[in-house]
Structure formats: structure tokens, C-alpha cells
Image (cartoon, grey):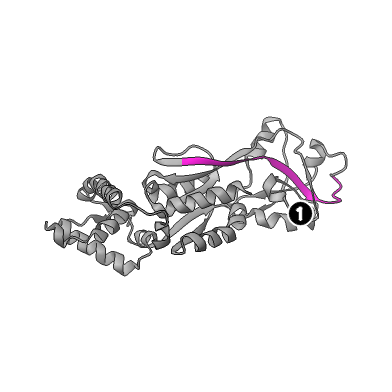
Amino acid sequence: MNLRSLDLNLLVILDALLDEAHVTRAAQRLALSQPATSSALERCRHVFGDALLERAPGGRMRLTPKAQALREPLRRALAAVTEVVGREPDDVRQLRQAVRIVMADLPATAIAAPLYARLQESAPGIRPILQPWRSESEAMAALDSGASDIAVCVAGAAGPDIRSTVLLRENYKVALRAGHPAVEDFDLERWLAYPHVLVSSRGQQDSALDRLLAAQGRQRTVGIVLPAFSMVPALLAASDLIALLPGRCLRDAAAQALAVLEPPLAVPGFELAMCWHARRDRDPGVRHVMGLVEELVQAL
């Protein structure tokens, strides 16, 4: 191979293709068109004399044995070039890429505007793509497959290649309309006497709270299941429904005509974490967005 004829940018594209095993996702990651990325893949195939990506049973693309063997040497080579060339502090301003973030509607609604504003100032070529939260397992699978770059989620078990950092700790509160008959002398019996709102993006009809109650021989009535936290306040204000919500959902409770109470039994809180795959450790665009997300979520 004649190194003089080798385009270093081609190796950068190949690195993304081998990470993603998906032409469209690699194109999105690099902010390139799909035809341009497909063309680069064809050039890489010619350079290395191998298909590199092949169709697996079921239709998904997979790396060929040759591509698997190239991954680590290619990463080391690009890391060495990066070290030689170096990066100025404002290099992120030159980046052109999409960064995909999966998170629930509550933090997404709170940080979307300031995240966009901060990126316009610091890295205007980075385009954030906020993806809907469905479950922890789906979020981890998306990080592993490369369908997502960052996940903001409840801290839990993750695979060996998933990195995480805790952003904040949250506690639950009971929310109901101001003037609700259960507010006076509020206790477990009054709490369970009224139908509850359950938030589940997948439409599940029970939660950890139901299992906690079942362990004590108690049961609540779920009156409605909603896919998003942002839908709850208006529904509570217009009904006798009750909801158990993260405390940060209720910062504007007074303006929403809601009363906020402590749960009548011990309900464990949770840690909200930011997770990413190890392959993103050296992606400056993703790292830059992670820093902004961490700062913005911790300020909630």
C-alpha cells in the first residue's frame, strides 16, 4: 500500500463505520451524507481488499474477520495521529457531527433549550438529537449498538464497556391538586383510597411502588397510565388522581395548583446517571456534549 495515496480522512470514516457497523449511523455521527459514507466504504474495501461490512442473517450488518482485526490497530493509529497533531482548546468549534442523547421527557424538556444555546456558542457544528427514553435495557442496548451516544437514565447494571457517572440523587414526592380531599390528615389509607397516575413510556401497568406495596400486603388503584411526566400536572389539577413523582417535577407545583406531600411510606429514591460506551471516550464531540449535559442536569 502506498501511504502517500492514502487519505487520512478515509481512516476516520472507516473508524466510525467499524464502530457503528451501520452506514447511516456512521454518516450521522460524522455529519456526512449517506452516499458520501457509502462511497468511502467502497474506497476502504478497495484499499484493504475486503468487504469490511457484510450482511448477517436477519439483515443486520456485521464486521468481517478482517474488519475485526483492523479495529484496535486503527484506533491506536488514529489516537497516535491525534496526539502528534494535537488539539487546540477551541477545536470543538470545527466539528461537524450529530450527537444522539436518549433521556426521559423531564430532563429533556428542562435542558433542551440551554443545551442548544450552549452548543451554538461553543460548538455550532454539533447537532444534538434527543431520543425518547423507553427503558434502561433499551438505552444500554442503544449505547452498545451505537444507535445512541449518551444516555441519561436511572443508574443500574450495565455492561463492561458502558461507562457512567452519577449526575444527581432524586427523591419521590406525592402530588395532588390543591384542595384535594386527601390532603387533610394525609396518610397511607387516604393515599390508597384514590386512583393513581402511573408514568411508563412502554405502557406498563405496575412499577417498583406496586411491588413495594405488595410486599406489605397493600395495593393501589392505577387510574391512568401516561407516557411522559410532563403530562401529569395538568391531569392532577383537573381531577382527584394522585401521583408519585420525582421531586424535581414539582418545582412549579404552586403555579400548577398542586399540593406536594411526603410519601406515607418509605419509598427509595434513585440516582440519575449519564452513561456512554467506551468507544466514545476519545470522541471530542461526544465528550463536549457530555460535559454540557452533566452541568445542565446537575443544575436542575
Q: Is residue 185 above or below residue 205?
A: above
Residue 186 located left or right of residue 221: right
Q: Which residue is mark 1?
A: 236
Answer few, some or many: residues within 10 Å of disc 1's Cα (few below 14, many 20 plus, some between 14 and 19). many
Secondary structure under tag 1 reads: helix
14 up-or-down from 269: above or below: below
Q: Position of residue 298 (x, y in %)?
A: 59, 46
Please tell me which residue is depicted at 38% across the width and 54% down the height of the picture: 88
Residue 177 screen position, x and y as percent: 81, 52
Single out the residue that lies furthest toward the top: 216
Using the image as rendered, state which of residue 78 and residue 212 is in the foreground.
78
Inspect the magenta stretch and tell me whether residue 86 lies in it.
no
Side of 5 where 246 appears, left or right: right
Task: Specify whether residue 16 is in view.
Answer: yes
The residue nearer to you, when weighing 285 against 132, is 285
Quadrant for residue 168, please give it: top right
Quadrant placement of the N terminus: bottom left
Residue 223 appears in the figure: no
Left or right position of 123 against 269: left
The residue that appears at 35% across and 59% down in the rendered structure is 26
Callout 1, which amino acid?
A: Leu
Q: Whole-percent x and y of residue 151?
A: 49, 49
Q: Which residues are magenta?
A: 164-182
Q: How many marks?
A: 1
Report if residue 175 lies within the magenta region. Answer: yes
Give me the residue at 41% from left, 53% from top.
89
